[in-house]
C-alpha cells in the first residue's frame, strides 16, 4: 500500500516548502537562523496542516544534526528523560546540539515540561515545539521564556494553488493520471488553509474516479465529501471544523445543533477533556455575565467527566451543552479584557497612583504611598468614589454592560454607585 499523498508531497528542503514567507522567505528570521547553521530553541504555533512538523524536519536535515521526536500524546516523563540522555551522548560528536521536536507540546503536563527545562537551559538539546493552542496558556512560563515563539498562518489561496498544481504534475502517482483542475473553489473552501487536508481531499476525489481522466469541479468535490466526509480525526482533519461548529451552535442558542456536533466528536473518539475545556471557555466567553451559573455548571461537568470517565461522562457534558446553548448570552467580560489588553499595549506601563500603593516601610509612607486612600468599608454601602485607574487613563471605560436580565442588575448597581461614568 502506497503512502498517503500528503506524506509523499512532504517538502524535504526550504525551497520546496510552501507558505510562511514571513518566517522562511529570503531574509526572514527563521531562514537567516537556518542558513547560519545555528538555531536556538523555539515554538511553532499555528493551525493544523501549515507545515510545523515539516519545517522541523527540514531544519534537522539542513543542519545534519541528530533529530529526536516525541509526541506529547503518547510520551511520558521517562520518555523525555531517555531522549535527553541519548542527546547527551550524541552531543560530543558535533558542535550543534541535537534537536528535540515535540509535537503537540501543549498536551505535555507541567511535570513533563519541567523535565525539559534543564536540558534546554544547558544546551543539551535544541527544543522545537509545535502547538495548535496558545502557548501562553499551555506552556509553562520558564520553558516559554527560553524559547522564541513563531506564529504560522493558514495557507493563502496562492499557496494552495501552488500545492495542488505541484501534486498533480509531480507526484509519482497523480502524474500518471490525466487530471484537470477545472474548478478549485470547493477544494480550497473545504481545506480551510490546511495543506494536509487539501491533499487528502484531492486524493479522495482522484481515487474515487475509475477512469484515468479526472476533471475536478466544485460539484465533484462536494459530492465525494458527502459520500465520505473524511472521518473525524482528532489529530487534525475535521477536528477544528467540528469544534468550531459546536461552539458556534452554543453561541447561536441552538441546543439541537450543539448536541449533534458533540455527538460527532464523541463518535470520532475525541478526548472528553477537550470537549469539557471548550464548554468552560464557551461559558466564559459567550454566556458570561448574562448567566454566571453557566461557568459553574461547565466546571462541574468537567469535574464529573474526570471522576466518572467514559462513556457515562457524555451525560454531564450533554447537560452542560444544553444549558449553555439555552442560556442568555453576553460577551461583555470577553470584550472588556480584550480591550484592556489592547489599552495596555497602547499605553505601556502606567504608574500606579500613590494612594493605591502599599506603604510597608517608613520611607514609602514619607513618599506618600497609600496617602489619601479611602477604605470603602468605612463608608455607607461599603463604597466611596475615588480614582482606581492610572492618572492618564482615569476616563477610560473598558466594561460595557449588554443588559441581559442578570447583567442589567450589575449595570444598575454601577449607575447607582458611579453615576455619569457608567451612563456613557
Image: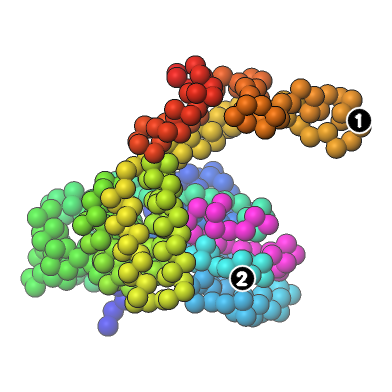
Image side of residue 208 versus residue 263, left or right = left
Residue at position x 34%, y 77% in the image: 311
Q: Where residue 78 sits: x, y (%)?
A: 62, 80
Q: Residue furthest top?
A: 420
Q: Nearer the viewer, residue 250 or 374?
A: 374
Residue 116 numbered mark, or none: none
Residue 112 numbered mark, or none: 2
Q: Nearer the viewer, residue 316 or 375?
A: 375
Q: Secondary structure at mark 2?
A: helix
Marks 1 and 2, the one that precedes in the sequence: 2
On screen, residue 346 above or below 165: above
Q: Secondary structure at mark 1?
A: helix
Residue at position x 31%, y 64% in the image: 318
Whether residue 167 can be seen here = no
Whether residue 305 can be seen here = yes
Residue at position x 44%, y 27% in the image: 412
Q: Which residues are magenta?
A: 117-142
Image side of residue 134 versus residue 365, left or right = left
Q: Are marks 1 and 2 in contact (CB under 8 Å)?
A: no
Q: CA distance from mark 1 to mark 2?
A: 45 Å
Q: Residues within 10 Å of mark 2 (few under 14, many from 20)?
A: some
Image side of residue 248 versus residue 377, left or right = left
Q: Where residue 345 sits: x, y (%)?
A: 58, 32
Amino acid at each position: 500500500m502506497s503512502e498517503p499523498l500528503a506524506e509523499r508531497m512532504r517538502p524535504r528542503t526550504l525551497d520546496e516548502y510552501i507558505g510562511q514567507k514571513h518566517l522562511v522567505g529570503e531574509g526572514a528570521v527563521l531562514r537567516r537562523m537556518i542558513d547560519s547553521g545555528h538555531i536556538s530553541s523555539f515554538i511553532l504555533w499555528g493551525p493544523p496542516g501549515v507545515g510545523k512538523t515539516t519545517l522541523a524536519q527540514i531544519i534537522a536535515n539542513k543542519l545534519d544534526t541528530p533529530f529526536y521526536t516525541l509526541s506529547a500524546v503518547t510520551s511520558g516523563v521517562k520518555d523525555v528523560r531517555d531522549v535527553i540522555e541519548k542527546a547527551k551522548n550524541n552531543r560530543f560528536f558535533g558542535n550543534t546540539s541535537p534537536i528535540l521536536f515535540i509535537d503537540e507540546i501543549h498536551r505535555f503536563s507541567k511535570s513533563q515540561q519541567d523535565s525539559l527545562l534543564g536540558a534546554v537551559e544547558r544546551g543539551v538539546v535544541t527544543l522545537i515545539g509545535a502547538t495548535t493552542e496558545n502557548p501562553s496558556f499551555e506552556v509553562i512560563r520558564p520553558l516559554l521564556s527560553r524559547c522564541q515563539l513563531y506564529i504560522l498562518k493558514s495557507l493563502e489561496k496562492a499557496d494552495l494553488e501552488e500545492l495542488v498544481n505541484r501534486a498533480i504534475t509531480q507526484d509519482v502517482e497523480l502524474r500518471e493520471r490525466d487530471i484537470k483542475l477545472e474548478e478549485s473553489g470547493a477544494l480550497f473552501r473545504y481545506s480551510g488553509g490546511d495543506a494536509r487536508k487539501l491533499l487528502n481531499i484531492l486524493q479522495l476525489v482522484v481515487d474515487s474516479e475509475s477512469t484515468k481522466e479526472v476533471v475536478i469541479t466544485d460539484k465533484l468535490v462536494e459530492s465525494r465529501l458527502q459520500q465520505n466526509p473524511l472521518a473525524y480525526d482528532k489529530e487534525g482533519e475535521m477536528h477544528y471544523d467540528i469544534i468550531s461548529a459546536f461552539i458556534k451552535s452554543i453561541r447561536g442558542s441552538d441546543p439541537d445543533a450543539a448536541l449533534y456536533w458533540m455527538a460527532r466528536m464523541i463518535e470520532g473518539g475525541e478526548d472528553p477533556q477537550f470537549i469539557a475545556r471548550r464548554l468552560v471557555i464557551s461559558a466564559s466567553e459567550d454566556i458570561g455575565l448574562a448567566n454566571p451559573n453557566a461557568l459553574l455548571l461547565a466546571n462541574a461537568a468537567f469535574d464529573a467527566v474526570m471522576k466518572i470517565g467514559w462513556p457515562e461522562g457524555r451525560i454531564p457534558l450533554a447537560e452542560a451543552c444544553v444549558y449553555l446553548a439555552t442560556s442568555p448570552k453576553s460577551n461583555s467580560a470577553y470584550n472588556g479584557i480584550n480591550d484592556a489588553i489592547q489599552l495596555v499595549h497602547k499605553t505601556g506601563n502606567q504608574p500606579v497612583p500613590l494612594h493605591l500603593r502599599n506603604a510597608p516601610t517608613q520611607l514609602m509612607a514619607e513618599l506618600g504611598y497609600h496617602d489619601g486612600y479611602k477604605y470603602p468599608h468605612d463608608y455607607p454601602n461599603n463604597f466611596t468614589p475615588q480614582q482606581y485607574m492610572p492618572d492618564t487613563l482615569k476616563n477610560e471605560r473598558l466594561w460595557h454592560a449588554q443588559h441581559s436580565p442578570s447583567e442589567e442588575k450589575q449595570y444598575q448597581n454601577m449607575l447607582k454607585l458611579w453615576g455619569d461614568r457608567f451612563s456613557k
